[in-house]
Structures are given as C-alpha cells and as structure tokens.
Image (cartoon, rainbow, N blue to C red):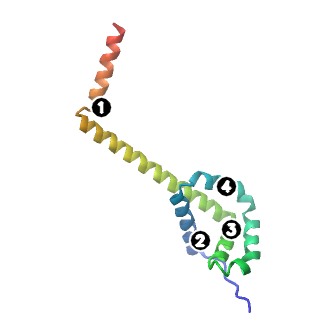
C-alpha cells in the first residue's frame, strides 16, 4: 500500500527555508542561488510536480524528498527562500564590514595615529603642494 505524506505546514516550511539558506551560506553561493531561484520561480510548480512524480523512486533514498516537492509547489515559498538568502547575505556583509573597521582601528592604534592626525597631515600636504 502506498504511503502519501501530508503537505508541509508553516513550521516545516520555515525549517526547510533555513536549512537551504544555511547550506547556500556555507558554500558561499548566495548570488548564484538567488539568480537561479529568481530565474526559475515561474517553473517552481512544474518542478514540484516532477519531484512528486519521481518521489516513489527517489524517496527511497531521501526521506525528505517529498517535503521539498511540497515546498516547491508554491511560488511563495521560493520567494521566502530568496528573501532569507538575501537577509543572510546582508548579515554576512555587515559582519565583514565590522571586522574590517575593527582591523582598521587596531592598525591605527598600533601606529599611534588617529584619523584626525591623518586628515591634518593630508591637509598640510595639500597646502604645501599649492605653494
């Protein structure tokens, strides 16, 4: 007898979105993933239906295959995934900027000069060049 799974609920959907987004982040593929998902968003329903068609065969090897099929049946889920990947990419970029700023401050402390001193030096060089 065949066992049919129920469509995923919001909790499962959010777990799938987070799992996929974290994998994308892990491999550093945010831009290609967003590009691919945006490009194929209109075809997500067809892709989900194909996954349902192949789930009796592939589902033997992957337990969550049908969950992914239900996930891709709805274009809203694809949009949620894109938004989550973008949010993670933005968080990662902000963290990178903070680290860069901290390194710059540490370097300035190490050299014993401040940004104000650097600005004054540049200004004095400009005035010397004008003379």
Which is in the foreground here, disc 4 or disc 1?
A: 4
What is the x, y in percent for residue 99? 37, 47
Return the residue at label 4.
36
Q: CA distance from mark 2 to mark 1?
A: 48 Å
Q: Looking at this view, name the residue that lies furthest to the front.
A: 61
Front position in the image: 30 or 87: 30
Check contact, mark 3 vs mark 1: CB within 8 A: no
Tell me if residue 53 comes above or below residue 86 in the rendering: below
Q: Looking at this view, name the residue that lies furthest to the top.
A: 131
Asked where in the image residue 66 lies, by quadrant, the reply is bottom right
Q: CA distance from mark 4 to mark 1?
A: 43 Å
Which is in the foreground here, disc 2 or disc 1?
A: 1
Q: CA distance from mark 3 to mark 1?
A: 52 Å
Q: CA distance from mark 3 to mark 4?
A: 14 Å
Which is in the foreground here, disc 4 or disc 2?
A: 4
Q: Looking at this view, name the residue that lies furthest to the left.
A: 112
Check contact, mark 4 vs mark 1: CB within 8 A: no
Tell me if residue 119 comes above or below residue 46 in the rendering: above
The answer to which of marks 2 and 1 sits earlier in the sequence is: 2
Check contact, mark 3 vs mark 4: CB within 8 A: no
The answer to which of marks 3 and 1 sits earlier in the sequence is: 3
Return the residue at label 3.
72
Asked where in the image residue 108 lies, by quadrant, the reply is top left
What is the x, y in percent for residue 72? 68, 68
Asked where in the image residue 109 lies, by quadrant, the reply is top left
Return the residue at label 2.
13
């Amino acid at each position: 007898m065949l066992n049919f799974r129920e469509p995923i609920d919001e909790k499962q959907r959010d777990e799938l979105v987070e799992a996929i987004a974290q994998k994308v982040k892990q491999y550093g593929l945010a831009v290609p993933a967003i590009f691919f998902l945006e490009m194929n968003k209109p075809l997500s329903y067809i892709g989900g239906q194909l996954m349902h068609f192949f789930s009796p065969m592939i589902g033997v090897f992957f337990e969550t295959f049908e969950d992914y099929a239900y996930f891709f049946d709805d274009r809203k889920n694809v949009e949620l995934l894109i938004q989550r990947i973008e949010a993670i990419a933005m968080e990662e970029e902000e963290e990178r900027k903070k680290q860069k700023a901290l390194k710059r401050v540490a370097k300035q402390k190490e050299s014993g000069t401040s940004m104000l001193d650097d600005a004054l030096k540049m200004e004095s060089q400009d005035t010397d060049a004008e003379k």
